[in-house]
Image: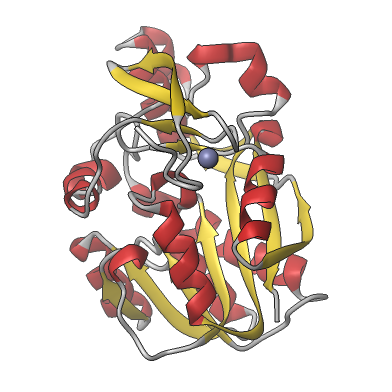
Amino acid sequence: MNCPLCRSGSQFAFAAKGFPLHDCEVCGHRFAAIDAGAGHVSGTYDDQYFFGGGAGYSDYCSESEMLRSRGRMYAKKIAPFIASGRILDVGAAAGFVLKGFADEGWKGVGIEPNATMAAMGRDSLSLDMRVGSLESLATNDRFDLISMIQVAAHFYDPERAFAIAHDLLNEGGCLLIETWDRSSKLARIFGRNWHEYSPPSVLHWYSKGGLKNYLETVGFDQIAGGRPSKKISGGHVRSLLRYRLGDATILKLIPEKVNFPYPSEDLFWALFRKRS
Ligand SMILES: [Zn+2]
């Protein structure tokens, strides 16, 4: 199977949860060798993903305040480079991150494949939400910022997604990405047991350098980046651990409502500007 980014040949690396993971022979990108078409999105991000636990969320909405403050945090981080305008938040879920950007003066649109989540953002947060994936988005809108917070790992066609993002950005517009770093120390220590090797919801494992190199070939320049701090709710910790450990009694000791700092050494963010 060819690399979904640069279309070069690939080699089998190892299997995770029964799915073959391949490494690109040229750009080094690691991906699940699954023929994930548009149907992948609706099949994977159903209500079960957001509310059912497993590799997804036990109750996504319980993290609303945290996600909203995450949007505000990123708006402040990128303000020295781009401070306001129109934003497209990709994989917006119920719009909490987008609402955080709105708190800081951004106006815009969220696109989300799960109709229940999109409706929630529309009804309870009064946001402009569209149902669908970036790969299938047809719009005449143009944006100053496109945000992909923990989304790029899920694209069924990342080459197309990044090309569309490039087209939708105004001159000088920026692309903000937060995703997992498979070249991080933590990922290397855990090897194939790293928690992010959870296909088929996750399909791509970028490295910080690999993503930068790729985006440079398709018309973006990196202008900022770093490692975000992150907190997740006790309920989400329980749900993720249960997925790994089964129903261990010790999980009941984790308080549901307390937010835990998450070791984010294996997570990174990067801001890219569209090259003129
Ligand atoms: Zn490649």
Nearest to the observer: residue 83 or residue 253:
83
Residue 171: x percent and y percent?
Answer: 65, 87
Residue 106: x percent and y percent?
Answer: 58, 84
Residue 29: x percent and y percent?
Answer: 54, 35
Image quadrant in which you'd find residue 164:
bottom left
Quadrant containing the C terminus in the rendered view: bottom right
At 31% across and 17% down in the image, what residue appears? 17
| Residue 133 in the figure: left or right of residue 182 | left
- Picture layout, residue 243 above or below residue 200: above
Can residue 99 be seen here? no
Extreme-front residue of the structure: 9
| Residue 270 in the figure: left or right of residue 98 | right
| Residue 5 in the figure: left or right of residue 37 | right
- Picture layout, residue 182 above or below residue 163: above
At 35% across and 70% down in the image, what residue appears? 111
Can residue 271 be seen here? yes
Image quadrant in which you'd find residue 199:
top left
Count of marks placed on residues:
0
Nearest to the observer: residue 202 or residue 15:
15
Nearest to the observer: residue 272 or residue 160:
160
